[in-house]
Image (cartoon, rainbow, N blue to C red):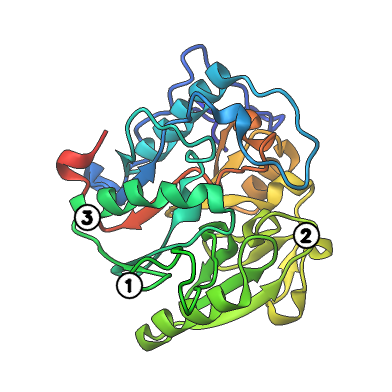
């Protein structure tokens, strides 16, 4: 297990940051070649105004959030994911949760239509970043201006945080932000590419990936009380709720929040390489480690890199 500075944690399993908080660079793939690009978005000055649905609002320290975000991005870079910034001087309170705006499946990025209307303007900057990277995109909403009043066929909604990919299976949460029409539209886009789309009902949680994520070997980590698990393979329950959120980094590595120290020790004991980052300010807004990036395997960041 590694600490936020990337060095091995001690025998206690506790992750303590070094003074500079910088992760090591030795975890890159052999030869230092990048794994791909990672879309990331700076926290807005208005971050504290972000939407809160299932939690009681608590004060957010924007300066601390920016520092936590910087260390999160450094951790991705240390494992070969080249950061690509989205937007500039971002005015969107929830824009930092960039995962919700795009779903990347193979060589295609599906630009979503977020369930919260105030978040739909976030998609434009993500589209621009993907275009700079040469990634093909398609709109969930389809062509035209679907949000124009009186439009005959209003599209569905879908947040990227509701989409969990495990092999060729794409699990999609049906809950607060993603509706049935959004799931049908995503299925129509992905099934021709050989993906199987499986809807999963959620309850009492913002997104599917607030309740379940997948380890590098495909094992699901989840909280069964927050979803209908009938359509899912068997899940392992992490020692604490925050441990249900992991980002696979490659070569058996995972990114995990500092708020799940027992899960970090458990995963380390199971043979996974765990990198711990503090995302506490984002957790106050129902965010987690998955929300803060969109990984694009095999995509070269080039001049778009941070």
Tell me which label, 2 or 3, sits earlier in the chain: 3
- The one of 117 and 242 positioned closer to us in this rendering: 117
Tell me which label, 3 or 1, sits earlier in the chain: 3
Residue 17 position within the rendered picture, expressed as x and y whole percent measured from the top left? 57, 20
Per the image, the residue denoted by label 3 is 131
Mark 1 is surrounded, within 10 Å at the Cα level, by few (under 14), some (14 to 19) or many (20 or more) other residues, namely: few
Mark 3 is surrounded, within 10 Å at the Cα level, by few (under 14), some (14 to 19) or many (20 or more) other residues, namely: few
* Left or right for 128, reference 244: left
* Left or right for 113, reference 226: left
Spatial CA distance of label 2 from label 1 is 37 Å
Quadrant position of the N terminus in the picture: top right
Spatial CA distance of label 2 from label 3 is 36 Å
Q: Is residue 201 visible?
A: yes
**Element assignment for label 3:** helix
Per the image, the residue denoted by label 1 is 143
Q: Residue at x 73, y 47 (%)?
A: 53
Per the image, the residue denoted by label 2 is 223
């Amino acid at each position: 297990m590694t600490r936020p500075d990337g060095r091995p944690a001690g025998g206690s399993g506790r992750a303590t940051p070094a003074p500079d908080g910088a992760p090591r660079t030795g975890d890159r793939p052999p030869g230092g070649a990048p794994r791909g690009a990672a879309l990331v978005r700076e926290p807005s000055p208005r971050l504290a105004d972000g939407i809160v649905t299932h939690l009681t609002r608590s004060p957010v320290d924007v300066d601390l959030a920016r520092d936590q975000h910087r260390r999160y991005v450094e951790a991705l870079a240390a494992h070969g994911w080249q950061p690509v910034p989205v937007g500039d001087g971002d005015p969107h309170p929830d824009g930092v949760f960039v995962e919700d705006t795009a779903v990347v499946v193979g060589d295609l990025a599906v630009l979503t239509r977020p369930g919260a209307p105030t978040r739909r303007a976030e998609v434009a900057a993500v589209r621009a970043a993907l275009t700079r990277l040469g990634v093909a995109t398609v709109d969930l909403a389809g062509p035209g201006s679907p949000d124009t009043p009186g439009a005959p066929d209003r599209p569905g909604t879908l947040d990227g945080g509701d989409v969990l990919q495990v092999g060729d299976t794409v699990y999609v949460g049906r809950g607060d932000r993603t509706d049935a029409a959004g799931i049908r539209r995503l299925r129509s886009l992905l099934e021709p590419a050989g993906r199987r789309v499986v809807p999963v009902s959620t309850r009492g949680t913002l997104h599917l990936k607030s309740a379940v994520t997948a380890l590098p070997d495909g094992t699901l980590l989840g909280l069964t009380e927050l979803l209908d698990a009938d359509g899912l393979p068997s899940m392992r329950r992490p020692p604490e709720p925050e441990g249900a959120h992991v980002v696979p980094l490659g070569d058996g590595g995972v990114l995990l929040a500092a708020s799940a120290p027992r899960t970090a020790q458990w995963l380390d004991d199971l043979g996974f390489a765990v990198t711990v980052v503090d995302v506490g300010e984002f957790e106050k807004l129902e965010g987690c480690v998955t929300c803060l990036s969109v990984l694009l395997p095999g995509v070269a960041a080039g001049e778009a890199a941070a």
